[in-house]
Amino acid sequence: MNTPREKSDESGGGGQPPLPPAPSAGVRLEVAILSDQAAPPVPPAPPDEPAALTVLVVAAEADLRCYVRECLGDRADLRVLEAASVNEALAVAAHESPDLLVVDARESEVVASLGLRAIVIVDEVPRQARPPRPSIRFLARPFTGEELVAEVGRLLT
């Protein structure tokens, strides 16, 4: 016995709309031409922007280096570099010429080696202690970002 067949869905997608047609050769050529064009040049920085000052953070503790970087991150005029040891700091300083050091007291020998303005992070500022020169400041732990930024500002002005 012959039974009538149900009409099948011609789209083959089970009720989904058919895919759009492939782009024509002309459209593909236009996309290729537009893709090959160079991006517009980036304009140079305005001349009235201050040149970036380089701060070298020297501390064996990665957390301290990261905290100092975060604290100084809002200052667009500062470029912050990091070194985990005195030897690494000397190598970085040879290539980058930092303007200021932020140094953990444990690595403070780098201050004398480089002779730069410096903020030395100490556990406690001694009452009678005066820095060996005016371009060195002590900052006691724990310190806030505002305190660090203020000390940096004092040394850079």
Image (cartoon, helix red, strand yellow):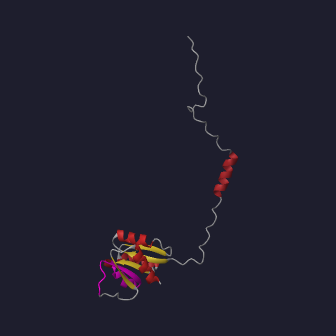
Q: How many tags in the picture?
A: 0
| Image point (39%, 88%), residue name | 134
Residue 1: which quarter of the image?
top right
Name the residue nearer the viewer: 148 or 66: 148
Magenta stretch: residue 109 in it?
A: yes
Horizontal side of 63 relative to 72 (left or right) equals left
Q: Residue at x 42, y 72 (%)?
A: 71
Residue at 47 percent across and 71 percent down: it is 74
The segment highlighted magenta reads 107-127
Q: Residue furthest right?
A: 26
Residue 156, given in percent of the width and then of the height, sits at 46, 82
x then y, percent, for residue 54: 46, 77
Residue 148 in the image, given as x and y percentages of width and height: 40, 76
User: Looking at the image, which is closer to me, 71 or 41?
Assistant: 71
Say whether residue 114 is left or right of residue 31.
left
Say above or below: 33 vs 122: above
Q: Is residue 120 magenta?
A: yes
In-image side of 113 versus 97 (left or right): left
Is 18 left, or right, of 129 in this rendering? right
Quarter-of-image position of residue 136: bottom left
Residue farthest toward the top in the current orientation of the protein? 1
Residue 23's x, y, as percent? 66, 44
